[in-house]
Amino acid sequence: MITLQDIRAAQNRIAPYVRKTPLVEAAPVKSVVLPDAAIYLKLECMQISGSFKARGAVNKMRLLSSDQLQRGLVTASGGNHGLGVAYAGWLAKIPVTIFLSHNTPLIKAQKLESWGAKVIFEGAVWDDANRAALAVAERDGLTYVHPFADPAVIAGQGTVALEIFEQIA
């Protein structure tokens, strides 16, 4: 289970490597359902990789041993998680391999490669690409970075909520 303490530790760990993104009120939006409620937007599109996914990937990377880092990272992605992992690998100057399904837009693959990642297209859907990534991780001793089921990734991504609470207070 991920605790608030885990998320706070992640926030401290990743602070030098991610942007504190703006929180803006979506005024003058009116809501019939919530007429007196303010609606806010957390602009994670302004994050270094274009989404909140960099937070989790960087947190995971910062928790790895030097031996794990040297062997490299591998993941499967539809794009945004891959960009976060590619960015984390670029920061650490380590090899990163991203498996994408064949339905991933080419522009995503080009962005991944611009961060230094090796891109491999595998299968029709993410599940196919993920199976290939897991097999390579096991075969080559790479660290697999799961996009949503890894406690370190979850804690890093949870730092968005801490920022929201800080910014809205």
Image (cartoon, rainbow, N blue to C red):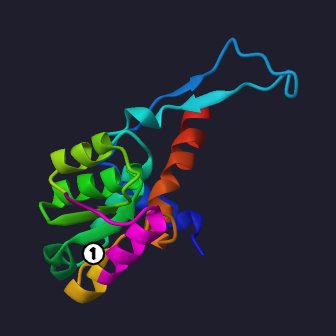
Above/below status of 164 relative to 34: below
Q: Is residue 123 visible?
A: yes
- The residue pinned by badge 1 equals 64
Q: Amino acid at mark 1?
A: Leu
Furthest residue to the top?
Answer: 28
Could you tell me which residue is drawn at 63 percent across and 20 percent down?
Answer: 26
Query: Label 1's element?
Result: loop
Viewport quadrant of the C terminus: top right
Quarter assignment of residue 25: top right
The residues colored magenta run 118-135
- Residue 56: x %, y % from top left: 41, 59
Residue plotted at (39% across, 49% down)? 80
Q: Which quadrant does the N terminus fall into?
A: bottom right
Identify whether 60 is placed above or below 79: below
Identified at 36% across, 51% down, the residue is 54
Say whether residue 153 is left or right of residue 117: right
